[in-house]
Image (cartoon, rainbow, N blue to C red):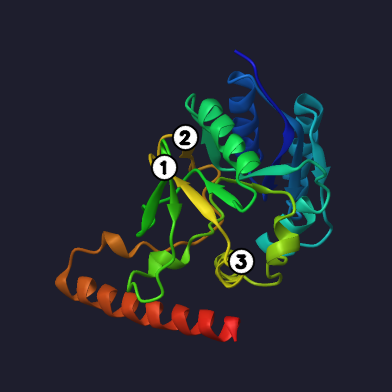
Amino acid sequence: MTHTFPNTTLLITHYNRSQSLDRLLSSFKKLDVHFSEIVVSDDCSKEDQLNRVQALQKLYNFKLIATRKNGGLGNNINKGQAVITSPYTLYIQEDFVPTPLFPQRFREALTFMEEDRELDLVRFYAYFAYPKMKPYKPGFSEMKFSFWDPDHIKFYMYSDHPHLRRSSFLNKFGNYPEGVDPNKAEFGMVLNFLKKNGKAIFFNEFTTLFDQVNTSDEPSTVDRPDWRLGRNPFIRLARQVYLRFRWLKNTLQLVLKSS
């Protein structure tokens, strides 16, 4: 069955992982999913990697936005989004792969965006469920930010994980911070999204629409320390202290951002 989305551009950010990019694009092709356009924004990959991306361009017919200088993830998303002309953008980093469940759920998400003009974002993937949600439509929930909730995950109403958004997203929330590491670029947009009272919904079965694939040949380029792995009592205590500090720090960042 063919799935065509003529009002949506697929935006992929890429950096030195051409095999992953090929796997992602091949997966959409196998699912017979088609978009208005595909934009691949490359962050100054090495010459051999860029050559492979250019070869893939001929195979998958995407628009390549390259640069001569590495500007970080924020710059990579900004320059990719800038060339998109369709009403909606599906944003995915190159290490994700859609599952067969994706097309139908994505069509539903697009319908929600068309019907609800206040809706800014639909999130399809996460490591954790958002802490406070209200039922929205079958299979989806609206994320609700609670200022006094001590869970630091509440700040991530926005996330760089696969999501659908309006292509006017940056006009409302501002550009991603540039010249900083990916985690800071993402959190800069997190604060902007909360400050501007963004409205977002969350796919309840958030691990079923995409798989994140990192191989030994092309490992993740983003360092995300996982505090869940430590079982030692001292590590668990340190984790609790760290998370309380992080909650307080992020709260102050949001307050100062909003003032």
Neighbour tally class for label 1: few under 14, some 14-19, many 20 plus, Cα within 10 Å: some
To which quarter of the image does residue 37 belong?
Answer: top right
Residue 106 location (% of width, % of height): 56, 33
Provide the residue designation for mark 3: 189
Q: CA distance from mark 2 to mark 1?
A: 7 Å
| One can see residue 75 in this view | no
Q: Are marks 3 and 1 in contact (CB under 8 Å)?
A: no
- The answer to whether residue 83 is left or right of residue 133 is right
Q: Nearer the viewer, residue 81 or 180?
A: 81
| One can see residue 253 in this view | yes
Q: Residue at x 41, y 37 (%)?
A: 139
Q: Residue at x 71, y 63 (%)?
A: 172
Residue 80 location (% of width, % of height): 77, 51
Residue 8 location (% of width, % of height): 71, 37
Q: Residue at x 39, y 42 (%)?
A: 204
- The answer to whether residue 95 is left or right of residue 90 is left
Q: Residue at x 62, y 69 (%)?
A: 196
Q: CA distance from mark 3 to mark 1?
A: 21 Å
- The answer to whether residue 189 is left or right of residue 131 is right
With respect to residue 3, does 25 lie above or below?
below
To which quarter of the image does residue 87 belong?
Answer: top right
For marks 3 and 2, the one nearer the N-term is 3
Residue 244 location (% of width, % of height): 32, 79
Amino acid at dot 3 = Met
Q: Nearer the viewer, residue 180 or 174?
A: 174
Query: Which mark, residue 206?
Result: 1
Provide the residue designation for mark 2: 209
Amino acid at dot 1 = Phe
Amino acid at dot 2 = Leu
Q: Are marks 2 and 1 in contact (CB under 8 Å)?
A: yes
